[in-house]
Every structure is written in C-alpha cells, then in structure tokens.
Amino acid sequence: MLSIIESISGSNSTHFILLGFQTSPLVKTLLATLFSIAYMFTILENATIIFISMRDPKLHTPMYFFLSKLSWLETVYVSVTVPKMLSDLLTGNNIISLYGCMLQLYLFLSIGCSECFLLAAMAYDRYLAICNPLLYHSIMTDKMCWVLTLGSLFLGFLACSFSIGLIAQLNFCGPNINHYLCDISPVINLSCDDISTVEIVDFLTALSVLISSLVLIITSYVYIISTIKKGPSDRNWRKAFSTCASHLTVVVLFFGATIFMYARPQAIDSFNFNKFLSVLYSFIIPMLNPVIYTLRNSDIRISLSALFSFNAVSSKTGILTPSGQ
C-alpha cells in the first residue's frame, strides 16, 4: 500500500468531485432517507447474525463461523461507500481527496473479491459436510476455518493490488467523477494517459477471481448433487436443499450482479445506468443476504426466537441480562 501512496503523489489532481445522483434537492433528501434506513437495517441484520453465532452454542459450527465472517465482510463492504454517499446527499459536499478515493476504491474492490473467495470456502464446507461427513470434523477444524477465511481476505486484497497500483500511477486531468463512489471505470476515464493496460489488467483480474471461485463452487455442488442422488430417499434431497439453498441464492445474486458489472472488456456506455446498477450489488444485495440466510435457515430462526423469547421473559420478571441492557 505504501508504493500505491507514493505513486499517486505525482498526479495532477489532488481531489475529486463525486457527482452522485444529479437530481433535485427534494429527491436527494428522499434518497438519503431511504438509503439511511436501508443502511441501518443492513448493519442491524449482520450484527444480529454475528451476535447469535457467537452467543448460541448450537451455532458454533464451521457453517455459522463462515456465515458470521460473511456478515463482517458485508458490514465493512457497505460502510466503505454508503456513509460518504449519504453525506454527499445531505450536505452537498461531494469532494473526496485523491488518497481517499484510492483507498475507497481499493477497499471496495478488495472486499468484493474477498467475498467471492469466502463464498467458495463456504461451498467447500458444504461439500465436506455432505460428501465426506465422517472426515468433516477432522478436516474442518477451527484452524482450517481461520485459514480459509484469512486466505480469502489475503487473495482478495492481493488480486486488487495490481489494478490499484496501475490506477495510482495515472495522471488525472479532471476532478468530476460521474458516480457516487470511486469505481474503476469512472475514475480511469478521467485520466490523461493511455488506460488500455489498466482496462486489460482490471478485466483479467476480475475474470480470474470470478472463474477461480465459481469453479470451486460449481465443482462442490456437482459432487453434492452426485452424492445426494445416490441416497435412498427424497429426505436427503430436502435436507441438502435446506442446507445449501441460502448459499446458492446468495451466490447467484452476488456473482450475477458482479459478472454483469465487471467481467467485460469495456464499461457500460451509460454511467447513469452504472450508478443504479452499483446500488444493486454494493448496497441492495448485502442488505438482502442476511434476510435470505434467516428465512431459509431453521437454526437461525430458532436461535432468534429463543433470544427474543428469553428477553421478553426477562423483562417481565425484572431480570437484567447482558442482552437486555
């Protein structure tokens, strides 16, 4: 990261202006209100999953370990961009420093790539649980869970370092970014230099991250389906579906939006369309993921019901508990 900071010191621009949503003040206020409610809801959802995964001993398993780490990632993911966007909508101060823009871009892309690898690790966990149940606990130890989680973070941040390093060396001739966040296409289009190398590296990086993680996910589910088909009854299908349906839904939503946005040689012509598409994959999907896992997961629903029931009984009897403070 030090080399990136040193590289941008020679740029012609010292700040950028995020044009954001160019509309009337009334609409901006309405958008800020809606996004604020959605942001608080997203933080609350993910915090709840993290809390119950730590609190309930029945959820101290690798599957919920990965789910809680996914919630951590998505909390940071939305917090990298949404607070700045809300501030811009409410105050009109759309200025972001060059360093701040590069940092936001680096964190935004790196966490997104890390989530790709973490979803692949979760698919591998489901593969072991269903296809190799006898070896599952000996392989998926606490140490292995941490190795897969930290490895996902390392690979995600490493993959994006190359693109950000090249972007940081560009000279920028104009300050206006036609977006509400620092994303690759609107940033590099401000450059006075030849950006063909950056576009190729960015495309290959996105493609390699998506293909490597998707290959592992698809391979895992091919083996899972093959194993279930050998089972004696439909009960195996139902049990496996309830276990994997949430993960598959999140994979389809996250990878579908990401592939459409990034895995192509050229950017979408309309940056205004890009803004609304970005809201989908950077904001809406992270808000929906905890809901998907909660609705499709009986263990989490039971844990939440027990938590709220316990708090209700405690408040009626006058017992002060840590969760009720």
Image (spheres, rainbow, N blue to C red):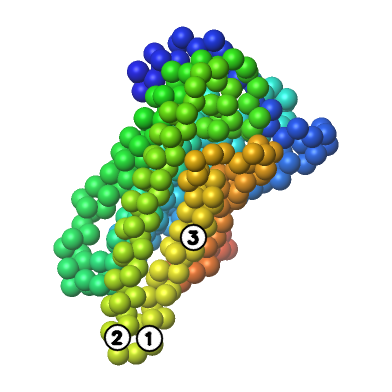
Front label number (1 vs 2): 2
Q: Are marks 1 and 2 in contact (CB under 8 Å)?
A: yes
Which of discs 1 and 3 lies nearer the camera? The answer is 3
Amino acid type at mark 1: Arg
**What is the secondary structure assignment of the residue under circle 1?**
helix
**Label 2, label 3: how far apart the Cα atoms are:** 26 Å
**Residue at image coords 77%, 36%:** 28
Check residue 231 in the rendering and tell me which mark sits there, or answer none: 2
Q: Which mark is residue 252?
A: 3
For label 1, the residue is: 235
Is 314 displayed left or right of 58 in the figure? right
User: Is residue 54 among the parts visible in the rendering?
Assistant: no
Give me the C-alpha separation between circle 1 and circle 2: 9 Å
Label 2: how many Cα within 10 Å (few below 14, some 14–19, many 20+): few
Q: Nearer the viewer, residue 102 or 322?
A: 102
For the N terminus, the quadrant is top left
